[in-house]
Amino acid sequence: MEMEKLVALCKRRGFLFPSSEIYGGLNGFWDYGPLGVELKRNIREAWWHDMVTAHNEWEVPPGAPSAYAMVGLESTIIMHPQVWKCSGHYDLFCDLMVDCRESKRRYRYDQVYGRWVECRGQKIFVATEALGQEAEQDTLQKALRFFNLRSKEAEELARLSPVQPLRQVENLQQVLGPDAKTLGTLTPPRLFNLMFETYVGPVQDEASKSFLRPETAQGIFVNFKNVLDSSRVKIPFGIAQIGKSFRNEITPRYFTFRSREFEQMEIEFFCHPSTSRAWYEYWRNRRFQWYVDLGLSSERLRLREHAPEELSHYSCGTADIEYAFPFLPPGEFGELEGIAHRGDFDLRSHMEGKLVRQGDQLVLELDAEGKPRYRGSGRDLTYFDDETREKYIPHVVEPSAGADRAALAFLCEAYAEDEAPDEHGIPQKRVVLRLHPRLAPIKAAVFPLVKKDGMPEIAREIYAELKPHWNVFYDEKGAVGRRYRRQDEIGTPYCITVDGQTLQDGTVTIRDRDTLRQWRVHQKDIVSQLKDLLR
Ligand code: GAP
């Protein structure tokens, strides 16, 4: 699947638009159009339903160490600044970046690649932001331009290395920046905090500085005690939250994959330390299966356990659910969701203050005077088990998903091109989104075969009957074959057509988007039939 085709479809049919497009757009920000908003709502609702409301706290789900409860939360986007100091985001939520003095562009240090080339005795490193095959082409073109060579003179250029990360280059004076014409324009790497800053109240000073949350998770940790005290939940239990997060990504890219404003669907699952490893394994598998059940094919989806050196400073185990997005070079995968075993790091941080790892211990970070670098809340966030009389700090397992990345993966997986017969039975090329019916923006379309003989009236009657149950669409314009194709292209699983036979026996045809099978159903049975089909 070529990504350009999906991007064009998303724009043409109203799934996704660049934010503030009439002013030229804003890099890293995207708006969901009329169909996109339905798709994303369906993803959020499927997640909330499957993880929270449909969860039965009396049953032990397959693979779970025991039964457990799930509740929800909606915390604010702007929180007390101390939250981010204790969580570590204030000091550590940074990327290394390099600036180009010539092009004035800024790049993520770990996302610049390049290769060594030599011509007429001069050895330079040609940098690029492209990957794989594209990086080969891009560096070659840039090197030719730099040395003033024409394509047919390419043999004068010696390629001294394969494409490699900029990180491996010691002398930046020899580097030709990704958008530069001269050498040595890249600055040494510097840390850049990804949190968006804002001010609370009328005075803009250090004391009123606050942040747009870069994750929803912290809102859950700081409400742990509130939830415990206000509901009947007992450990083990999970708190779920869906909401916007903001990161000032240095290089937003790949459509919505890396945006600056995006939506997360996070669970913080609190459990006894002795069972936390088993819960980690449960959530890892449970979350993987969720994507499979909603239609992501298992050969493009994988569960990747992090190597010890990849783990965050607080984590004793993390796995990523990754998808082979079509914009990535062959063999590369992009993260859809991370499942992290976070130990007691978060609750302890919000009790005691910012923690650092010392050997295999987490200890309070101290400043030059031996005082806590960032003080915690001082609140007691321990848990008392009144059956065992044990008091402990719960461990946390965190499945953290991105709603926008999930939407993008479902769209990429669903996009297909095949052939379907038109109204004369002649095969025609069609674009089809094979979205899972739970995710499809429109569940069914209703058509009168022709705009006469009372067919539109019956079709509108059916439309009115279906509307209270689902998002359905009525269309009477153009040839019926074209109407089918317009619905296929946006993933509508079923089309219902009123035709001549309807006038005689009250039956309509239902057409299946994927199999193209058509069958007749009596008008009075359409709702129950669709209920079965969409279940
Ligand atoms: N609380 C843990 C946490 O936030 P993360 O791996 O940084 O972990 C979790 O983010 C998920 O949020 C990612 O797997 C991804 O789906 C989504 N996400 C993160 N950054 C994103 C971005 N810039 N654009 C879109 N989605 C993003």
Image (cartoon, rainbow, N blue to C red):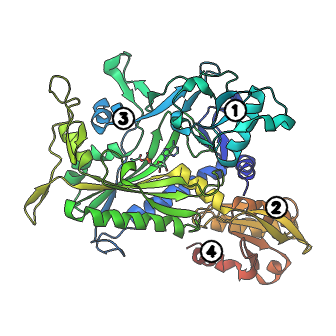
Amino acid on which disc 4 is placed: Leu
Question: As drawn, which residue projects farthest toward the bottom?
Answer: 505
* Residue 294 coordinates in the image, percent (x, y): 55, 66
Q: Which mark is residue 92?
A: 3
From the viewer's perspective, tell me whether residue 91 is left or right of residue 358. right
Secondary structure beneath label 2 = loop
Point out the image quarter for the C terminus. bottom right
* Relative side of 370 to 157, left or right: left
- In 3D space, how far apart are the residues under numbered discs 2 and 1 (Cα atoms)? 65 Å
Type of the residue with mark 2: Glu
The mark found on residue 519 in the picture is none
In terms of image quadrants, where is residue 358?
top left
Report the Cα–Cα distance between label 4 and label 1.
66 Å
Front: mark 4 or 3 = 3
Disc 2 CB within 8 Å of nearest ligand 1 atom: no
**Residue 530 shows which numbered tag?**
4
Label 4 residue SS: helix
Query: Tag 1: residue type?
Result: Glu
Cβ atoms under marks 3 and 1 closer than 8 Å: no
Q: Residue at x 66, y 62 (%)?
A: 414
Instruction: Please indicate, yes or no, whether residue 329 appears anywhere in the rendered image.
Output: yes
> Would residue 441 be seen by someone viewing this image from the given angle?
no
Task: Find out whether the residues at labels 4 and 2 contact each other: C-beta distance under 8 Å.
Answer: no
Q: CA distance from mark 2 to mark 3?
A: 57 Å
Looking at the image, is mark 2 or mark 3 nearer the viewer? 3
Q: Disc 4 vs disc 2: which is toward the camera?
A: 4
For label 1, the SS is strand
Picture residue at 29% right of the left edge, 35% below the top: 83
Disc 3 residue type (three-letter): Leu
Sequence-wise, the earlier of marks 4 and 3 is 3
Disc marking residue 476:
2
